[in-house]
Image (cartoon, rainbow, N blue to C red):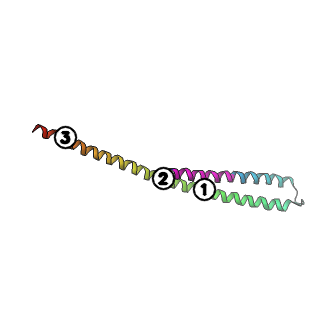
Amino acid sequence: MKGVRTQEENLDQLKDSRKCVACKADAIEQKIKKMGIQHKDWAAQSSLYNDLQSSKRELDSEIMTGEAKLYDFKRTVTKIWMTIKFDGLQELCRKGIVSLYRQTCSSHDNYF
């Protein structure tokens, strides 16, 4: 289950990065809206805004892929964990039946 937690933490880091990029993009967008096209920094700010938007889309894609992988990983790990648990329970029951059978047989032998 430690592997699940690690992947969840990595996904949380991606989401935090996405929020940070989105905030920066929003700030740049507001700055561009206040500027005119004639402003000397307008082209640089527009380019930066487009780069941030591109980064945001890439992070969105990584997050979606990460969430799908995490879901599959959780399902696989849970299946393995439940198989191990119930195999152990089945073995315990089998040993209990054998033990009960031996006790029953030995108690019948005492009567004869």
Q: CA distance from mark 3 to mark 1?
A: 59 Å
Say the numbered circle drawn on residue 104. Answer: 3
Mark 3 element type: helix
Mark 1 element type: helix
Q: Amino acid at mark 2?
A: Arg
Q: Amino acid at mark 3?
A: Thr
Say the numbered circle drawn on residue 48. Answer: none
Q: Is there CB contact under 8 Å for labels 1 and 2?
A: no
Say the numbered circle drawn on residue 75. Answer: 2
Residue 15 in the image, given as x and y percentages of width and height: 65, 52
Q: Residues within 10 Å of mark 1 (few under 14, many from 20)?
A: few
What residue does disc 1 label? Answer: 64
Q: Is there CB contact under 8 Å for labels 3 and 1?
A: no
Q: Amino acid at mark 1?
A: Met
Q: Which residues are magenta?
A: 2-18
Q: CA distance from mark 1 to mark 2?
A: 17 Å
Mark 2 element type: helix
**Quick check: 100 above or below 3?**
above
**Discs 1/2, front:** 2
Give the mark nearest the N terminus, 1 or 2.
1
